[in-house]
Image (cartoon, rainbow, N blue to C red):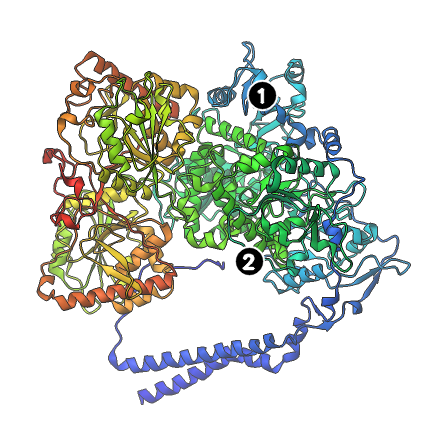
Amino acid sequence: IMCASAKYNTRGPALIPRMKTKHRIYYITLFSIVLLGLIATGMFQFWPHSIESSSDWTVEKRSVHDVPVVKLPADSPIPERGDLSCRMHTCFDVYRCGFNPKNKIKVYIYSLKKYMDEYGTSVSNTISKEYNELLTAISDSEFYTDDVNRACLFVPSIDVLNQNALRIKETAQALAQLSRWDRGTNHLLFNMLPGGPPDYNTALDVPRDRALLAGGGFSTWTYRQGYDVSIPVYSPLSGEVDLPERGLGPRRYFLLSSQMALHPEYRSELEALQAENGESVLILDKCTNLSDGVPAVRKRCHKNQVFDYPQVLQESTFCVVLRGARLGQAVLSDVLQAGCIPVIIADSYILPFSEVLDWKRASVVIPEEKMPEMYSILQSVPQRQIEEMQRQARWFWEAYFRSMKAIALATLQIINDRIYPYAAISYEEWNDPPAVKWSSVSNPLFLPLIPPQSQGFTAIVLTYDRVESLFRVITEVSKVPSLSKLLVVWNNQNKNPPEDSLWPKIRVPLKVVRTAENKLSNRFFPYDEIETEAVLAIDDDIIMLTSDELQFGYEVWREFPDRLVGYPGRLHLWDHEMNKWKYESEWTNEVSMVLTGAAFYHKYFNYLYTYKMPGDIKNWVDAHMNCEDIAMNFLVANVTGKSVIKVTPRKKFKCPECTAIDGLSLDQTHMVERSECINKFASVFGTMPLKVVEHRADPVLYKDDFPEKLKSFPNIGSL
Amino acid sequence: MQTRKKYIFLTFLASWLLLFFGGDQLRRFAFFPGRKAEAQRNWPRWTDRSLLKSFADPEELQSDGDPSLPSPRERRAAWLSVYKNSRCRMETCFDFSRCEKNGFKVFTYPRERDQPLSESYGKILTSIERSRYYTPNPEEACLFILSIDTLDRDHLSGQYVRNVDEKIHNFPLWNGGRNHLIFNLYSGTWPNYTEDLGFDIGQAILAKASFYTESFRPGFDISIPLFSKDHPQRGGEKGWLYQDSIPPKKKYLLVFKGKRYLTGIGSGTRNALHHIHNGKDIVSLTTCKHGKDWEKHKDTRCDKDNVDYEKFDYQELLHNSTFCIVPRGRRLGSFRFLEALQAACIPVLLSDGWELPFAEAIDWGKAAVVGNEKLLLQIPSAVRCIHPERVLAFQQQTQFLWDAYFSSVDKIVHTTLEIIKDRLRPHRSRSRFLWNALPGGLLALPDFSTHLGDFPFYYLQLGSSPSEKFTAFIRASSPADSLSQPILRLIQAVSGSQYCAQILVLWSSEKPPPPRGKWPRTTVPLTIIQGSGKLSDRFFPYVAIQTDAVLSLDEHTSLSTSEVDFAFVVWRSFPERIVGFLTRSHFWDPEQRRWGCTSRWTNELSIVLTAAAFYHRYYHSLFTEYLPVGLRELADGLAACEDILMNVLVAAVTKLPPIKVTQRKQQKDTVPQQVGCEGGRGRGDPSWAAKQSPSPLHSPPKVKGTAGAGSRRFSQRHDCLNQLAAWFGSMPLVSSQLRLDPVLFKDQVSVLRKKYPRLEKL
């Protein structure tokens, strides 16, 4: 079975036998030839495509008037009326969609025909500009298939966007004779203006049997939840008028109504609001005395004042969207485009894409009966929320209203999500505007769980050849009560680890993992042997940490399982002179990183480090043999949005071996390299995720005047 | 020789590769026409596409109105007569005006003696009566709940109540069911299990388990989960996820163990489940043993299935599987659903047409896999393909939802009520985001704010941070005429903080506050609020508090500016928690079988006294509006209980311990801080500090205080803790072993380098 999901290796780096030198040249040549072959293949792959896209010679060029004509006999069958009880599991044939690795439905579009009745009168306009755009968008999308037998969803090319423009019975007959009609099963119709006088039904009146309806203006009585899709009424002004995005915040008018054909009852209620609240409310109407040639649709008037529409919408914080004869109104689209917060007054209206969009974050819905209280209701909206709603409104327009393409793709995506719910787009992806998506974090470990102490932690020691020091570390760490397993990652391919009998005898299982290559990232691999959530990464020369210090570190990690918990802290600073980041290891009052020479963290971050590290950071670190700890700090802060926790006073890992080579110049190069790492990572992440804090964690009774022997962690270590 | 062979082989290999990968491309180059024909089937780019007419005239779009139409008022009136009963919606079948004057109040019909009441329905009624919306007065009620048990409407059941129609029509309040809420768990009976309740619910809202989408009135009815009679009234068990592992280290991928029906409704789905059983990571077991006469319908698989069935234990499977199949039974919902949710076994629903519980609020796509009964065979591959990160997110979400909405009857009933309440004022209701993010809709009150950034919980998701100032809130209750020295010093210290926006003094003494001139001059505004003297006053959501952070203080508290500054900076990192200086810890006393709390110097803490603590102002609203009146009265009646109540509340919301920050060492005689839990804090008693000698090595909590008054307060505080634990259904407090200090605290380095040197001085 093919999965779309990325397979990852749970075994760990495999052991590769070391090549013999004499075969090396042979293998290198072999490899380069294969590589060359692949590059050549790649070039062949792309070469022809670039020709195709530059001139669209593959696409047919014809006029809509040349399409074949179909005559509908007067007695040709008419589908049943729409079935109100239809749901996906009753009226939709899922077998047509099947399981596929991409989890995408396949959509087929019937070819365009012109329909005539018996007398040769055409049934409707062949196709409108908008419907053509919609079908083009579907045809260009990933959903499209030209193979009718593989299709899961069928879209007729019969244009029913506007019910007024078509003859109901004949259109129904035209639908019924489609080759795969089959009672309308898996057929999708798009309609924006349903119903007609005098009763204005809220759904398309054309009998359509089981066909799904993407309709603008559903009421709760006609909308088949989970089957139909509620779509916006497209406003052609979206394409014509460019309204640049306005800054957020209060605007000149507080409340504005721009609709022209309001019922007198509504209008008088609005005017009452204006009378009460004065200038902050603006109620516009049709202009009566416009000179010829000025399109009435682009002007609005209040008394003698003339305003440009839709530009005037940008002058108001809230804009009224009242129901007319129909529930769905094109003005909603204009209002959203202007970044004005829609005040929706249309009882029982199903808002566009309400299955996925959280309209409460972008609009205010007020029951018709509460219209007189509208002003006070709106005034109770907090200022900061107004800004967010403005941003949200504009984002909805940009993503789901601005073009027929946007409307078509959102509709198909919603249907797709129903058929492959386990691959559905999340609430956040639908609703969060890019600015929020960028700045917000969704912590993968969001549940506030304090892991049970009994689980303990797994210590991972990365070592190369310092066996003596390694053994000391093992002995020291094994004294920590909560240690549950010790894993030695043997990173030296030239030398075998010591024999079993030579290793220190400790009370917990000790495992040695041999790696294929001497890479720093081996320390952060999610080895299967790690059975606890908590991991203690520790270098093979860290022998100065006391057992109390380590145990306390573990206890702190349990309270902050989604953070890095470490000992010496480090800081990043913005160097104003150099205009870049700088690494700081001095005695600072702040920390933003901890060294992973000894640090506790969740095993999940090993998984992230190995498989989800952005950009080329992982390879870069392996190549430079440095900064794997900074990379880990970046990764964790970026995905959780939280700071590290530094525990205990410790500021440095002083190792006895290091002192000999510790020189000033070495120290300086070290600092420069580390600063480079920070700058490199910040540019790859596209932001500086590290969080600066001024605190560290100490035991509750640290340095308190209290008998040491009664303290849980008396020997907490020193600088 | 060897080498030459190798190179020949290499050349051969390279050319072969080229042909293999490149050949296909070359072929395509050669046969253009084939591709062209294929491409033609795309939707054409019409040559005259720019000339096409718009679907509607702009005029037509903008003036969509018809003056001849009936007026909106008439239309709404006409609706009322058309959209009734099975077509009910809130705007046609619910009388909003009943809820306007007194707000959302719920009335339960008095229970009658001779009326049988099932255990579950009893719990539902209790939940309502315990809620903050309950009213015993039908006059002021907005919503009515019957005392007739309507949970089991299977007329073959022993709990079926007869003649419901007759009974309800005799109720003067019934009014055709308007503004009534009816709970039901089982409807219909063998063989069809229809949605029929056996009586006419009229215009009542139906809260029903196993709701079928077709009979569900959207935006009006509510789908609730099926729960057993043993479901706890309050609190409820915790979820079973203790470990976030990736990849999910469970023994099984997908399991099912249950009955299958050989005939009748629902049998199709369950009879097919054995197909996906592979005996390894997918275990799907059914038994035919069901009902009395199963052997009559027995099929060829039954004997083998029955044997396999006994080999596995249901609980064991539940605990050790990543996904659990939750198929329909005779009815659409099953107990299995909540069991799987609690077990963090991601439910894979095979129950077509089931309106999922609270789907109006809950986004099930984040916690369950909604499968299709027809596509059973695709389920294994579908769940195998879900990314490990997503599995982990699913698991955590099941736990959140379980704990927020399902773990007790209280939560189920309160969620139902909140959903209805939200419909009454759509502009002041919870967005879908609030329902589906921690801590959940029941704990995020839209009455406080509809702006997400005003709550302490969502900063990270929104990419924002709490405001940079705080409001100092000092409670003064000493009966003295003039201001005492401590409070003057406190005001000075607090107003010295660069983060202080304003100081509020809650004057709780009977005597009037000193005149303006007696108060110290401060750089920040100082306001005096007259309190009513109640202890719970200190957590009232005063409008004057406009900053996110509140620094709660007592007049006796002694703090320095450094301490305040540092604590506030820490709070900004933990805005959902209480951050403070003085701590207590709770413990379970196994001898007396009750909770106790201690002020001994301990290695742990779980309570931060609000005599000196930062917390988010939202907790004032939650304290005053979320907690039922009874609980607040309890806090008013017992000394120092409101402190604990606040801590318990915040812990119940966050599931996290409070945070203790560095406190300066002080001279012992002026320190009230070390006074114990045991002694209470003796409000209004000026000599209290002196009586309780602060000794680090305090006697253990079991040895009660010496003074009589002390021992009474001791028991009071313990009583408080125990009563709160009883009300919450469990002990929400969480212990912490750490204290947050400045990075260089007490380090042997020059004080000049330190940002908070004063914290280290005596």
Is residue A138 placed above or below B635 in the rendered structure? below
Marks 2/1 in contact by CB < 8 Å: the verdict is no
Q: Is residue B21 left or right of residue B247?
A: right
Kindly give the residue lying farthest to the front in the view shown.
B517
Q: Can the viewer see residue B307?
A: yes
The residue positioned 78% from the left and 63% from the top of the image is A113
Look at the image and tell me in which quarter the N terminus of chain B lies: bottom left
Is residue B381 placed above or below B126 in the rendered structure? below
Q: Position of residue A314 (x, y in %)?
A: 59, 51
Q: Position of residue B239 (x, y in %)?
A: 39, 36
Q: Nearer the viewer, residue A107 or A180?
A: A107
Q: Is residue A260 left or right of residue A355?
A: right
Look at the image and tell me in which quarter the C terminus of chain B lies: top left
Kindly give the residue lying farthest to the right in the view shown.
A119
Q: Position of residue A334 (x, y in %)?
A: 64, 52
Q: Nearer the viewer, residue B705 or B147?
A: B705
Query: How dense is the environment of label 2, judged by Cα within 10 Å: few (below 14), some, or many (20 and up)?
Result: some
- Count of numbered tags: 2
- Identify the disc placed on residue A100: 2
Secondary structure of residue under mark 1: strand
Q: Nearer the viewer, residue B735 or B446?
A: B446
Question: What's under tag 1, amino acid-wise?
Answer: Phe
Q: Disc 1 sits on a residue from what chain?
A: B
Secondary structure of residue under mark 2: loop
The residue positioned 11% from the left and 54% from the top of the image is A472
Is residue B161 placed above or below B294 in the rendered structure? above
Query: Which image quadrant is residue B176 in?
Result: top right
The residue positioned 21% from the left and 16% from the top of the image is B710
Residue under numbered circle 1:
B144
